[in-house]
Image: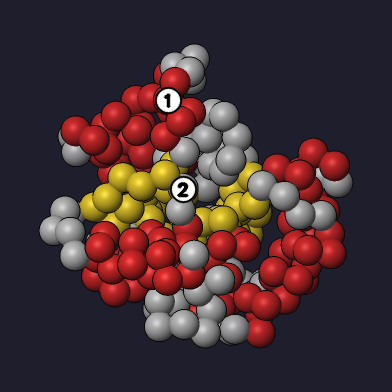
Amino acid sequence: MKRFAIWIIKQLIALRANYLVIPILTTVINAIYSQTGKSSVLFQARHLIDRSNNEQFEAFTSLLKDTEAKKKVNRYIQENSEFIQGSSLRGIVLGGNIRCFLKLAGTSYWPDLKGKILFLESFSGLEGRIRTYFAQLQQLAVFEEISGLILGSFTEFDSKIGRDYLLDIVKEYSNPELPLVSTESIGHQKDSLPLIIGQELSLNAQLD
């Protein structure tokens, strides 16, 4: 299975598209970026079967048409995000599912995170597992390299323990000066918005 995954990555790397639309394969799309600089869309395409979320459908189809795609996706994320620390962030976004992203640690496919924005989300995992993930990121000095951190939905943790405690855990392991954004609009949920991995994202705190 590992050899097959590496073969898939190499085949995708060989493509000449400016960016790729790939169902939420965090490990693959970050590996592609690390080797080629190509962008990919972090999104579960199966959710498009239900068009009840118009924002979601418009954001994704704009990527396919490449018509003001970046601005439209930025706007949707801006409208559904909250700054926990800092008031602005700007940079190339990498990351995705935290468990899958950490599979790249120690390999040649681990991307250069210096100055990047790291996006993280998770479907499963309660306190013990989530702490382990963030402790590993801390040991890798990730929080000293990145320019900002965006937390998507942590589905099981958010529903069973709560978002506030998740933020407390993240603050324990990350840099207190690091811009931190929370959004529950990107992740594994049915109405998740797409996120372009490998392209620049700019967010600013909303003034009341």
Q: Is residue 92 visible?
A: no
Q: Nearer the viewer, residue 41 or 2?
A: 2
Secondary structure at numbered mark 2:
loop
Quarter occupied by residue 171: bottom right
Q: Residue at x 67, y 77 (%)?
A: 136
User: Type of residue at label 1?
Assistant: Leu
**Residue 106 at x, y percent in the picture:** 52, 84
Position above or below: 202 against 6: above
Quarter occupied by residue 162: top right
Q: Residue at x 24, y 70 (%)?
A: 36
**Residue 141 at x, y percent in the picture:** 59, 84
User: Type of residue at label 2?
Assistant: Ile
According to the picture, the residue beneath numbered tag 2 turns out to be 24
Q: Residue at x 78, y 48 (%)?
A: 157
> Does residue 27 appear left or right of residue 139 in this picture?
left
- Of the residues under marks 2 and 1, which one precedes in the sequence? 2
Position above or below: 63 against 135: above
- Neighbor class of circle 2 (other Cα within 10 Å; few <14, some 14-19, many 20+) is many
> Does residue 143 appear left or right of residue 164 in this picture?
left
> Any mark on residue 48, and which?
1
Colour scheme: secondary structure
Q: Is residue 128 visible?
A: yes
Position above or below: 125 against 56: below
Q: Residue at x 79, y 39 (%)?
A: 159
Point out the image quarter for the C terminus: top right
Secondary structure at numbered mark 1:
helix
**Distance Cα–Cα, label 2 vs label 1:** 13 Å
> Does residue 32 appear left or right of residue 45 in this picture?
left
Position above or below: 169 against 142: above
**Residue 194 at x, y percent in the picture:** 42, 40
> Any mark on residue 197, and which?
none
The residue lying furthest to the top in this view is 52
